Image (spheres, helix red, strand yellow):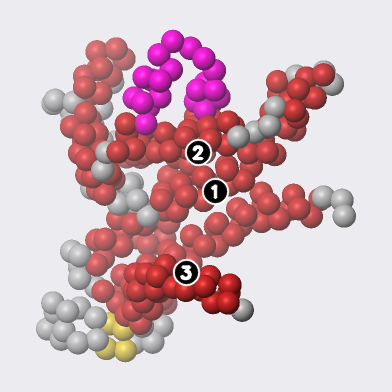
């Protein structure tokens, strides 16, 4: 009993912080979601409207379009980051000249603020002064203008996210690879397994928890990205890069529709939880069911 009391006492500060900065804001946003509220309008008071904000979401073409673009962005970004991160982690496992310097340079994007990343990429892609349009024009004769090319604008947001967050995936998977025991790999080599078989049957199952945790983190970040994309494209051209986070920002701040913005935030949180749960079931629960009892 005393040990349990001491344990709860040690956890009390963390639980209090989570309650104040996590649960209380969520409950407030949930409360606002059931109201019509524009504090800067003619009637600055909250007006209860039930589930009207949520019903409005079902018929909001801009919201549905932003969901489609966000899911596509998250898929390409997260999959590319996991693949590149694993390949780079395997590279860092080997000895080669300048490995420490290259590893340091590789992790530098992680210390740069997202809004700075978006600003730098905006400068690099500006047609008149950017290095990327200059090289594309010089080498391939291609005129890059993300203000009018929706496909290229979407591709650049994905490339920018990959450049910024692949080092995080690399470090996570590198830590997982370093901690693996050598005996299973030696046994697989003795049994005559090739590199692909060793990867598929030995390496991948052992680092699957690290991959799953990394995918969860990157998926949640990708679904709520705002500042990088806002600085690079502003959500354009049209709505080609108006992802969910940016869509909510435009509802809450320029339009000051706090009730509808809160309802949108709740739905986005729900969609994120559902996607993470489905991913967990696909990668973990099904594997556990196949194990012999």
Q: CA distance from mark 2 to mark 3?
A: 27 Å
Report if the CB atoms under discs 1 and 3 are less than 8 Å apart. no
Numbered tag placed on residue 172 in the rendering: 2
User: 241 or 110: nearer the eye?
Assistant: 110
Disc with the residue nearer the chain's start (2 vs 3): 3
Secondary structure at numbered mark 3: helix
In the rendered view, tell whether residue 159 sits above or below residue 32.
above
Give the extent of the magenta segment. Answer: 88-107
Q: Residue at x 26, y 49 (%)?
A: 227
* Residue for badge 3: 11
- Binning the other alpha carbons within 10 Å of mark 2 as few (below 14), some (14 to 19) or many (20 upward) gives some
Point 36% across, 77% down: residue: 24
What's the CA distance linking mark 1 and mark 2?
9 Å
Question: How far across and how far down the image is residue 92, in percent?
Answer: 50, 22
**Residue marked by disc 1:** 213
Q: Per the image, is 254 magenta?
A: no
Camera-near label (1 vs 3) is 3
Q: Are marks 2 and 3 in contact (CB under 8 Å)?
A: no
> In the image, 41: left or right of 155?
left
Q: How many circles with numbers are drawn on the protein?
A: 3
Name the mark on residue 197. Answer: none
Look at the numbered discs 1 and 2 and tell me whether their residues touch, using CB distance below 8 Å: yes
| Residue found farthest to the right | 293
């Amino acid at each position: 009993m005393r040990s349990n009391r001491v344990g709860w006492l040690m956890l009390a500060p963390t639980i209090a912080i989570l309650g104040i900065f996590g649960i209380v804001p969520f409950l407030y946003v949930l409360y606002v979601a059931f109201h019509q509220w524009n504090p800067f309008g003619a009637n600055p008071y909250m007006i209860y409207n039930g589930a009207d904000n949520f019903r409005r979401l079902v018929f909001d073409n801009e919201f549905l379009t932003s969901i489609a673009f966000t899911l596509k962005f998250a898929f390409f970004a997260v999959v590319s980051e996991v693949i590149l991160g694993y390949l780079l982690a395997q590279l860092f496992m080997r000895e080669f000249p300048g490995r420490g310097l290259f590893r340091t340079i590789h992790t530098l994007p992680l210390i740069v603020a997202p809004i700075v990343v978006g600003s730098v990429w905006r400068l690099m892609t500006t047609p008149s002064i950017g290095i990327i349009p200059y090289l594309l024009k010089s080498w391939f004769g291609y005129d890059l203008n993300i203000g009018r090319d929706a496909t290229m604008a979407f591709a650049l947001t994905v490339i920018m996210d990959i450049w910024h967050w692949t080092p995080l995936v690399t470090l996570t998977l590198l830590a997982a690879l370093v901690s693996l025991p050598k005996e299973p790999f030696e046994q697989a080599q003795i049994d005559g397994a090739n590199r692909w078989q060793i990867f598929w049957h030995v390496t991948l199952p052992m680092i699957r928890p690290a991959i799953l945790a990394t995918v969860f983190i990157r998926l949640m970040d990708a679904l709520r990205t705002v500042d990088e994309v806002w600085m690079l494209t502003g959500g354009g051209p049209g709505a080609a890069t108006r992802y969910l986070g940016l869509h909510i920002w435009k509802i809450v701040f320029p339009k000051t529709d706090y009730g509808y913005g809160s309802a949108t935030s709740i739905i986005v949180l729900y969609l994120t939880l559902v996607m993470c749960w489905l991913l967990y079931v696909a990668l973990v629960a099904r594997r556990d069911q196949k194990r012999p009892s």
